[in-house]
Image (cartoon, rainbow, N blue to C red):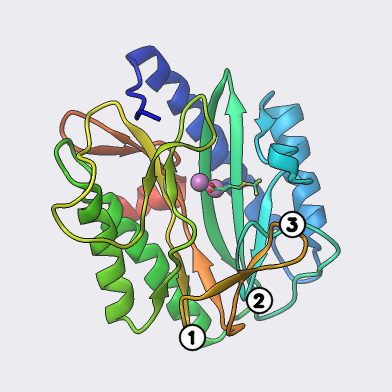
Amino acid sequence: MAVIIKTPEEIEKMHVAGRLAADVLEMIGEHVKPGVSTEQLDSICHDFIVDVQNAVPAPLNYRGFPKSICTSVNHQVCHGIPGSKVLKDGDIVNIDITVIKDGFHGDTSKMFFIGKPSILAQRLVGVTQKAMWKGIELVRPGAHLGDIGHAIQKFVESSGYSVVQEYCGHGIGRGFHEDPQILHYGTPNSGLQLQAGMTFTIEPMVNAGRRNVKLLPDGWTVVTKDRKLSAQWEHTILVTPIGYEVLTLRKEERQAATG
Ligand code: MF3
Ligand code: CO
Ligand code: CO
């Protein structure tokens, strides 16, 4: 399948979808606290997306996924299914939001701390977020996908952690998962060269221990084999004529970027 270059009209719709996905993460923050279950978080996000945003939660019924968001707690790597699990002090959780608005997808996730997590958990989450940004900052026309994967992998491994290789970022637009695949590891100067008008996600999964993962019998939840912690952050990115634009940027990040 070929990589779809978006027209200006399509890019405007991607801006809207990206903004809505970011808004869901901003909305849910105050609810992510000890005592809340992941299915309660799912229900709050579902209702906000459907009733307030007049949008569609993309995960719901996607290839049989039963809920509207993904919640991946502690050693869960990605695609955790919201359920009766109650969040407790010291947990870390990734909340992954994908919305469809006017036919286009916006996809973004962030890590939340419940109470006060361990120093290790805090460092893992920070390294993973920084790894995502090291990849994003290389996005510009002419850059190779291998440059992005390499930068992420080098930073993660030099920090003593490992990059999950079985799951990757992806082109996004009318499709939830379009070409190309965005690997979070790789070799500089190799792979596809970026062009203005491409839209894709960067969403590294980083493990505190070994990179190996396994799929739970529910068919969705991915966990670390060694049961050590895992973290993930995700943004939807547009390649612009001079570099990149983050379509799912949150207010807290805009403030960080402008000092
Ligand atoms: N949002 C995830 C991603 O970043 C995909 C979730 S698929 C689902 O690509 F079915 F689990 F929702
Ligand atoms: Co994604
Ligand atoms: Co996602």
Residue 239 found in image quarter: top left
Q: Mark 1 points at which residue?
A: 120
For the C terminus, the image quarter is bottom left
- Assess disc 3: are there few (<14), some (14-19) or many (≥20) residues with their C-alpha within 10 Å of its C-alpha: many
Q: Which residue is drawn at 51% across and 76% down?
A: 212
Of the image marks 3 and 2, the number of the one nearer the N terminus: 3
- Element type where label 2 sits in the image: loop
Residue 3 found in image quarter: top left
- Assess disc 2: are there few (<14), some (14-19) or many (≥20) residues with their C-alpha within 10 Å of its C-alpha: many
- Element type where label 3 sits in the image: loop
Q: Name the residue under label 2.
A: 91
Q: Residue 249, percent across and down? A: 42, 43
For the residues carrying marks 3 and 1, which lies nearer the camera in this image? 3
Disc 3 to disc 1: CB gap under 8 Å: no
Q: What residue type is labelled 2?
A: Asp
- Assess disc 1: are there few (<14), some (14-19) or many (≥20) residues with their C-alpha within 10 Å of its C-alpha: few
Determine whether 82 is above or below 201 in the image.
below
Using the numbered discs, state the Cα–Cα distance from disc 3 to disc 1 in whole angstroms.
25 Å
Q: What residue type is labelled 1?
A: Leu
